[in-house]
Structures are given as C-alpha cells and as structure tokens.
Amino acid sequence: SMSASKDSSKEAISRILFRAFQRKKASRPGYSRQVLARDLGVSPTFVTNILSGKKFPPKERLKELSRLLELDVHERTALFKSVVLGESNVQSLTQFLAPIKDILASRKSTSIDHRSVLRHWWILPLLEGLSLSPPLQELSSLQKRLGLTKEQAETALSSLLQADMVEVREGKTKKKDAHIYFPSGRPKKEIRDFHRQMIEKARDQLLRKTSEEDFHRRLITGFTFALNPEQLEGLKAQILEFMDTLTKQATQGKCTDVYQCNLQLFPLTEKRG
C-alpha cells in the first residue's frame, strides 16, 4: 500500500541519517542529538523524529543536515533523490533507495587517519594496481608502471598495511576489500592536498604526453556554462551517480591499467556581495 511504501521510505532515509550520526559521534566524543539540533536550529524532538524515521527530513534543511552529518557520496545522493521525487512519488523513492542500501552495506567505510594514505598521490594508485590481472598486480610491475622509486613503493605499501587496507596471502600482497571509500562530506585538508597532487599530475601529462597514442589513451574535455544556483545540488548528485556508474563499467573484465579521473565543479564568478 502507499502508506506502507511511505513508511519504508522514511525508514530507509532515517537509516542513512542514523548511520551518519553514529559515525560522527564516534569521531567526535560528546556529540549528541541535542548538539545536532542546536547546530541545525531545531528542537531535539525534531531531530529524534527524523533519525527514528517518524518524519521525512524537510527539504529546506537537507543541505545543512548533509553538511553537519558529513554525509558521504551515496548518502547525499539518496537524500537528494528523496527531495526530487518527494513524498508524492514514494514508490519510486523506495525503489531508488533499495540499491543505495545494498551499496552502503557492501562497502567498507574506513575510519583511519586520512593523512596516512592520502599524503602522496601514488599510494591509492598502488592500492588499485593490486586489483589488476596477473602478473600486472605484482609490486615490481606496479612500481615500474607508476614510475615510482623503490622507496616510494615501500612507503605506499607500509601506509596501506598500517591502514589495514592490504594483506599478504601466500607471499603476495592483495587489496583486502573490493570497495573502500573515504566519507568526504566536508573539505578536509588532506583530501584537498591529494587532489592538488593529482591535478599537478594531470598538468604534467598535458605537457609531457603529447603523442597520438598518448591522446588516444585519455580524454581531455571540459565545458563552461551559466548556472541557476538552485540546480547546484542536483548537478552534484548527478556527478556522484556518474562516478559510481563509471567505476562499475571500468572494472568489468580484465583490468590492465590504473586511471585517474579529476573532476572539479567550481564557480568562475565571485560570490555576490
């Protein structure tokens, strides 16, 4: 029935919010529903009703709620979809949230110190390289193909072992989880630094890799457009969904290369005073 579907949707959304709330409590001792209510400018009862699934989060509070709870990619996308579809199309919302719940359940959200694996651009590429087809996933092969020194490869491996993201089985180093991601609800300095390194890497590729074959192996594109600020969150959600779709397609079949996709959506005009 429509009422049952509506309740199911509230439960699915509240599960995502409650998960994020518990994550924030674990990383910030003393954080409570009262503190969240204060930061959000609402009553503690209001927060309790949203986290328990008694009420849908109101549209005008979603952006701030996402920021305060530092929601990750899929959580933000799910909440945005709930706003787009609205309570009038509960069945569609329920169908959308089902795969989102599966994704959240199957992925390992790492709570380690981000700096240990994001401090150098080559650490995560080496981690992904461990998923390549044999014998391309061998450390000696990855070191050579990523253009790393022996010291850099050893630093990367040490960081990944310390972060419990790899394991050694039968004398071979393997990636422990197929899907590891970092919740990125707020702009942490180490994440900014990592992306800066990757942007510099992309610039280096533009300057040095100029043969026909080099251009064939990549895509260089971008576009400039006018924006209605009300559409911004919708654009972000579509980009996040695209990232997931791209990754799934990329890993089908035999993987022989590690790629980086830099994508930054940013304003060229200054904020109005």
Image (spheres, rainbow, N blue to C red):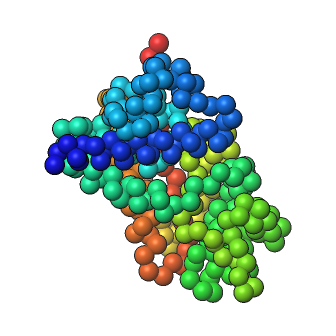
Of the pair 190 and 173, the residue shown nearer to us: 173
Regarding residue 219, the answer to whether it shows in the image is no
198 relative to 147 in the view: left or right? left
13 relative to 255 in the view: left or right? left
Percent x, y for residue 60? 35, 25
Q: Where 216 falls versus 79 (above or below)?
A: below
Percent x, y for residue 264? 49, 44
Considering every residue shown, the one lying at the far left of the view is 1
Residue at the image position 77 percent from the left and 62 percent from the top: 162
Considering every residue shown, the one lying at the far top of the view is 273
106 relative to 59 in the view: left or right? right
Of the pair 71 and 193, the residue shown nearer to us: 71
Q: Residue 117 occupies which quadrant of the picture?
A: bottom right
Q: Where 35 falls versus 127 (above or below)?
A: above
Residue at the image position 24 percent from the left and 43 percent from the top: 6
Q: Residue 132 occupies which quadrant of the picture?
A: bottom right
151 relative to 254 in the view: left or right? right
Number of numbered tags placed on the structure image? 0
Q: Residue 143 occupies which quadrant of the picture?
A: bottom right
Percent x, y for residue 13? 38, 43
